[in-house]
Image (cartoon, helix red, strand yellow):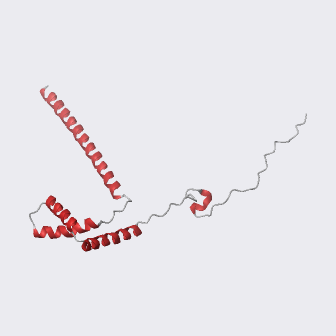
Amino acid sequence: EKARLKAEKDAEKARLKAEKDAKKAKLKAEKDAKKAKIKAKASASDKPKMPPNAYILFGSVEREVISKVNPGMGSKEIMSEIARRWKQIDPERKGAFEAEAAKLLAKWKLDNEKKPPTLWPPSHCPTCDGGMAEPQPPSQEPQAAPQPDQQQQEP
């Protein structure tokens, strides 16, 4: 009797453990699928990244200089120093960064120029040769009205 009860208890434990493991696996699979969907959505983004502006270009150059001179300086202090230097920069040097930023922006705009959408012919239209045919104006010929059946019935 004890052996049978122990066997039932062990079987119940094994069943509960299997259910718990299956539940964990399902949750993990759902979580992984959600992460994959988010990652795919982010990588499939059609929106190209904007080029850096003059301040960002200046900051990237100055960050290297400040980090070499003050290796123990934290990122917050470095950002504050970059902002202070940007406010005090001479107009000639600032103009060089602005010109570089304008050049990068012009190149970006040229590379990412949007083309107007094609409204006609729709690509799904079967009579338009898959969107490659010229649109045809509707026919101007009047259609004859259907004639009623004029068979004479014999008595």
Is residue 3 shown left or right of residue 119? left
Q: Residue at horizontal 38%, vertical 70%?
A: 106
Horizontally, residue 136 falls left or right of residue 3, namely: right
Between residues 17 and 56, which one lies in front from this camera angle? Answer: 56
Tell me the quadrant of the picture where the C terminus can be found. Answer: top right
The extreme left residue here reads 72
Does residue 43 sit above or below 98 in this rendering? above
Above or below for 37 versus 108 = above
Q: Which quarter of the rendering shows the N terminus?
A: top left
Q: Residue at x 31, y 72 (%)?
A: 100
Q: Quadrant of residue 69?
A: bottom left
Q: Is residue 68 above or below residue 75?
A: below
Which residue sits furthest right?
A: 155
Q: Quadrant of the rendered structure where residue 71 is?
A: bottom left
The percent position of residue 28, horizontal first and vertical second, equals 25, 46
The total number of labels drawn is 0
Percent position (x, y) of residue 7? 16, 32
Give residue 82's position: percent from left, percent from top: 19, 64
At x 79% / y 50%, what residue is drawn?
144
